[in-house]
């Protein structure tokens, strides 16, 4: 699912991904099959690991079949792999955990993420990373409309395109789009940094193109490296941000924004 | 909320079990619409010169066989509160005949291939009461309703049909339906409820009557309907999907060699055979996606 047309989609990767994660089995992996185990039981077990409680550190979830709120509300140094397509709010409110989905995700992946890393191998539906306050969200395919809406510090890197109204009222954090952006990018944006490599269908109110200065290039290079997309040339991107005409911006207070 | 599902068979195996698959998809969407449920199934075309009617009676003791005899229908295929009758004549005549004889009945659908069943209550109970798993067919669509703008009644459930072999299911709500209903009534389109979705179905019926193709009629929605919507439209040949330009309401499409499926969410499609290997994508806003089979001869 994503902004683009079907021919660019990566789908059905759930099953094929099994072979790709067979390495590094030194730590035992807790396998939970959602065809058998109720989702609430899985999430409760993951929540029980909060703040260093003993338990498995590596998890593999089978048969997600589009269920909602898988691995939501984690607060532990764990790795969770989801094999297949997930539904709404996957890895929502994530703290510290590393969550990887070998498939597509529905609305609101990593919504309000606080820290940690959420990675989607396929496409993400609307509102990916919405209101996120920290951490990193990586989407290998496309993200749909409203990607990074009201983001407040999260970093989002999308290998494909994003849909309309992305980074709407984005306050803080960085959104990197390696392909195109839809209509009304960055409408009513505050101080988030937007980088787009491809075409922008249209900029929202108070969003303007800005100069890509050396320190922006440096932060973009680092974000691409973190996402594993260092095959891309950062200088091909353009930077967008707030014209600061819509909200009360005082340069004297710039440090606190 | 509300949930939408659609299934278009590309293989005889899927056609044989269309109802069973559609029911499984519908049940997956119970959380999105526990108020009422409904399906339109395209199956068993009647001969030229005959019309298939799906009728609804509020009377649980309705004597469908007596009505079938009166109308000259070879029989009555009864499912819960509904029955399918086959009447000689063109759809307009057949529908008018039933309305004149029995104004207390509701004509849920009229055409050569369409059958519509819908009822209040949870989708799983609906699927069981109407024995959906028995139904074979070429394509079908379904709806689970969480009512927002009109009452929870059988008549207010989806799908809505205001044209022959044409039906519509809808997730969202329309804000200019009252004015548009007045306009369409002046054009001779009949409405049976105060429901907004019925107006959208009536709009499509009107545009098709005036010579528009299905794609053109749907594209007209972008100009003439105010509100938010994901539409799934069924015709005798196939179905089409349209989301409004803002695309608030969800939709997922998937396709394999055996089927094309549409669902409000992936979990509705995940129950189909071969779903894990399906090509899957999210329909872009304001773009009409349509599938059609070769015309029924």
Image (cartoon, coloured by chain):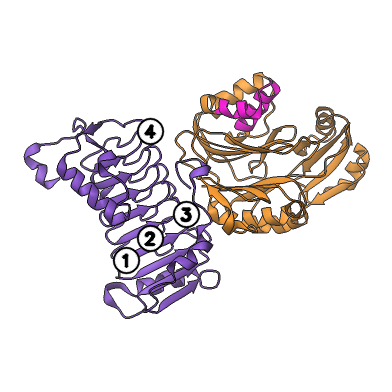
Chain colours: A purple, B orange
Q: Which residue is mark 1?
A: A97
Q: Quadrant of the C terminus of chain A?
A: top left
At which x and y percent is residue A192?
23, 43
Q: Which mark is residue A91?
A: 2
Q: Could you tell me which chain the residue with mark 2 belongs to?
A: A
B208, above or below A232, in the image: above
For the residues labelled 3 and 4, the Cα–Cα distance comes to 23 Å
At which x and y percent is residue B194?
61, 34
For the residues labelled 3 and 2, the Cα–Cα distance comes to 13 Å
Q: Which residue is mark 3?
A: A104
**Element carrying mark 4:** loop
For marks 3 and 1, the one nearer the N-term is 1
In-image side of B68 versus B294 (left or right) = right
Q: Could you tell me which chain the residue with mark 1 belongs to?
A: A
Q: Could you tell me which chain the residue with mark 4 belongs to?
A: A
A228, above or below A200, in the image: below
Residues marked 2 and 1, same chain = yes
Q: Residues within 10 Å of mark 2 (few under 14, many from 20)?
A: many
**Do the residues bearing badges 2 and 1 touch, measured as CB atoms within 8 Å?**
yes
Residues marked 3 and 4, same chain = yes
Q: Between residue B113 and residue A137, name the one nearer to us.
A: A137
Q: Which residue is mark 4?
A: A183
**Element carrying mark 3:** loop
For the residues labelled 2 and 1, the Cα–Cα distance comes to 9 Å
**Element carrying mark 1:** loop
Q: Could you tell me which chain the residue with mark 3 belongs to?
A: A
Question: What residue range appears in magenta?
Answer: B199-221
Q: Residue at x 92, y 43 (%)?
A: B74
Q: Residues within 10 Å of mark 1 (few under 14, many from 20)?
A: many
């Amino acid at each position: 699912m994503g902004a683009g047309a079907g021919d660019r989609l990566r789908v059905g990767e759930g099953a094929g991904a099994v072979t790709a994660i067979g390495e590094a089995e030194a730590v035992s992996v807790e396998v939970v099959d959602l065809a058998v185990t109720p989702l609430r039981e899985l999430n409760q077990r993951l929540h029980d690991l909060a703040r260093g409680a003993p338990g498995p550190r590596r998890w593999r979830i089978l048969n997600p079949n589009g269920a909602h709120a898988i691995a939501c509300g984690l607060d532990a140094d764990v790795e969770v792999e989801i094999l297949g397509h997930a539904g709404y709010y996957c890895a929502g409110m994530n703290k510290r955990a590393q969550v990887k989905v070998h498939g597509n995700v529905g609305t609101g992946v990593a919504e309000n993420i606080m820290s940690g890393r959420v990675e989607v191998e396929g496409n993400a539906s609307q509102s990916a990373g919405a209101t996120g306050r920290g951490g990193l969200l990586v989407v290998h395919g496309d993200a749909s409309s409203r990607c990074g809406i009201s983001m407040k510090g999260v970093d989002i890197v999308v290998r494909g395109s994003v849909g309309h109204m992305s980074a709407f009222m984005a306050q803080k954090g960085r959104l990197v789009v390696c392909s195109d952006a839809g209509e009304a990018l960055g409408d009513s944006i505050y101080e988030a940094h937007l980088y787009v490599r491809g075409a922008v269908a249209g900029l929202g109110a108070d969003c303007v193109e800005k100069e890509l200065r050396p320190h922006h290039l440096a932060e973009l290079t680092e974000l691409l490296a973190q996402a594993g997309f260092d095959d891309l040339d950062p200088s091909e991107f353009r930077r967008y941000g707030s014209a600061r005409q819509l909200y009360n911006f005082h340069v004297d207070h710039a440090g606190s924004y | 909320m509300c949930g939408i599902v659609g299934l278009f068979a590309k293989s005889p195996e899927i056609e044989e079990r269309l109802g069973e698959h559609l029911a499984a998809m519908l049940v997956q969407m119970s959380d999105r619409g526990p108020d009422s449920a409904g399906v339109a199934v395209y199956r068993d075309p009647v001969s030229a010169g005959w019309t298939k009617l799906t009728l609804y009676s509020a009377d649980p003791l309705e004597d469908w066989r007596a009505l079938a005899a009166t109308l000259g229908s070879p029989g009555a295929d009864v499912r819960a509160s509904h029955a399918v009758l086959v009447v000689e004549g063109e759809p307009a005549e057949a529908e008018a005949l039933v309305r004149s004889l029995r104004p207390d009945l509701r004509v849920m659908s009229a055409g050569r291939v369409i059958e519509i069943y819908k009822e209040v209550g949870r989708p799983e109970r609906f699927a069981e009461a109407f024995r959906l798993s028995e139904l074979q067919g070429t394509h079908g669509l379904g709806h689970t309703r969480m009512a927002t703008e009109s009452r929870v009644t059988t008549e207010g459930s989806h799908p809505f049909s205001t044209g022959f072999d044409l039906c519509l299911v809808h997730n969202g709500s329309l804000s200019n339906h009252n004015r548009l209903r007045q306009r369409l009534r002046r054009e001779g389109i009949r409405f049976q409820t105060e429901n907004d979705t019925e107006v959208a179905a009536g709009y499509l019926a009107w545009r098709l009557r005036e010579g528009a193709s299905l794609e053109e009629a749907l594209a007209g929605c972008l100009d003439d309907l105010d509100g938010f919507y994901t539409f799934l439209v069924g015709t005798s040949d196939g179905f089409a999907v349209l989301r409004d330009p803002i695309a608030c309401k969800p939709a997922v499409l998937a396709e394999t060699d055996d089927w094309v499926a549409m669902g409000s969410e992936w979990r509705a499609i995940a129950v189909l055979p071969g779903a894990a290997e399906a090509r899957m994508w999210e329909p872009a806003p304001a773009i009409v996606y349509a599938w059609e089979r070769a015309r029924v001869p």
